[in-house]
Image (cartoon, helix red, strand yellow):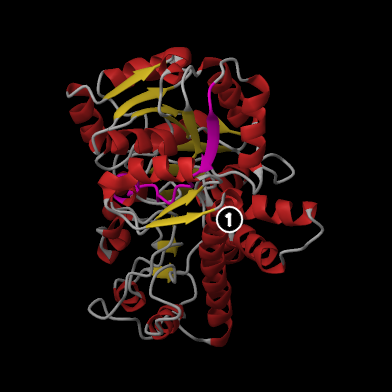
Amino acid sequence: MYKIAVAGTGYVGLVAGVCFAEMGHQVTCVDIDENKVNLMKSGISPIYEKDLQELMQKNYNTGRINYTTNYQAAYKDADAVFLGVGTPEKADGSADLSSIATVARQVAESVEKDCLVVVKSTVPVGTNDKVEQFIQDFLVHNVNVEVASNPEFLAQGSAVHDTLHAERIIIGTETEWAEKILKAIYEPFHLPIVSVNRRSAEMIKYASNDFLALKISYMNDIANLCELVGADIQDVAKGMSYDERIGAKFLNAGIGYGGSCFPKDTQALDYLAKQNGYELKTVKAGIDVNKEQKTVLYKKASNRLITFSGLKVAVLGLTFKPGTDDLREAPSLENIPLLLEQGSDVYAYDPVGADNFAKVYPEGLHGKGNITYVDCVEDALQDANVCFVFTEWGEVKATTPQKYQELMRTPLVYDGRNIYDVEEMKQAKVEYHSIGREPGKRQVTKESAYDFQST
């Protein structure tokens, strides 16, 4: 068992800390927000994440995890300090490392024994070298402090499972001492460990996320072409999925990727390449495709309708994906402002994301339009002139084609997640527009369809 401190209690830090505690380590999670700390001590998770709150309560009750704002006490005798603080994207596409620097200095001024500092946050290649030097510059006590890279590969909505049952653990170290400690910390997980140097570990994170983002953008590009030539993107994806070199995952066409990772990581890698005099043409293309894809449904609807002014517009789903309350880079944030500018009466439904969205767009008037948050799909659809599906929540998928026909004043649906069968919507007399599927064409049967995951 190791004594571990975790800096930051967002998706990365809190999930890591709870999972380390679940594996038997003694964990202290550090955050600057005292209200947040008190909330976690009371057993309430500050983020919506499957199984997280239950494990927080379990391990807090057994004494394996604690939460504090007192970083000096948490860091001074820790065997390892994991950095899980945010590295948000700056205006130029580079990563903001100010929180990393703040914690690094706090560690340097607090540690009183040999300690391994582990950067879990996604950082540009070479950052761990700078963090180690930064710590040495501010080190107060005569102790050995080394830095390791340990990027996370969790997906929001399944973060706990992804941590406890990861396909692999990536560790980047420069000494046998650091490698030995990090391997020992992860030994109770019984997972494959890939041990490389720090810069390779940093690059693995970016290369992996950007590859998946490119895969999504590629399928969206192909979907747009399918619409023009009369092909069906779901048939195309099914045919591609049998090729084991391609695989079945991340082949689902839609309205683009969002969240805390893919948009930020593609921009950061593009920026890093430019800083080194190189152009990553594939990554740049993926970024451009994704930007255009997010509003493709709004453009389709604009061509269909004379105006959105005075129309009741149902919006189903606000978060960037189901299973999370995270709105970062969500298509809803791109489309709802456009609808409000046109004078729409937006009625939005999301089972967990509405409160967060209301912080950005409070209920009421915004310019020419108005937004109202409702508690169920039916309230959003009632007497609506048009409906946009942005997130494939279970409650949305369970809504039958007949419901759209019965409840909407004009059953006109723009589906950004290809939830429904085209023929079934046609039979229900719903005017249905999706991504990459020609109306009236044969659809992939439910029995034979793959789960072409997107994020």
Other-residue count near label 1 (Cα within 10 Å), few / some / many at <14 / 14–19 / ≥20: some
Give the x, y percent position of residue 78: 41, 24
Q: Residue at x 56, y 50 (%)?
A: 335
**Quarter of the figure with the C terminus:** bottom left
Give the x, y percent position of residue 321: 41, 51
Please identify the quarter of the rendering in which residue 266 is found.
Answer: bottom right
Q: Is residue 252 visible?
A: yes
Give the x, y percent position of residue 53: 25, 33
Q: Amino acid at mark 1?
A: Ser
- The magenta segment is 143-161
Residue 277 shown left or right of residue 261 in the figure: right
In the rendered image, the residue lying farthest to the right is 277
In the rendered image, the vertical position of residue 105 relative to residue 281, given as above or below: above
Is residue 449 or residue 153 the one in the foreground?
Answer: 153
Q: Residue at x 34, y 40 (%)?
A: 185
Give the x, y percent position of residue 111: 50, 19
> Does residue 154 belong to the magenta stretch?
yes
In the rendered image, the vertical position of residue 300 relative to residue 23, given as above or below: below
Please identify the quarter of the rendering in which residue 21 is found.
Answer: top left
Q: Residue at x 26, y 64 (%)?
A: 402
Give the residue pinned by disc 1. Answer: 200
Residue 227 shown left or right of residue 63 in the figure: right
**Quarter of the figure with the N terminus:** top left
Q: Secondary structure at mark 1?
A: helix
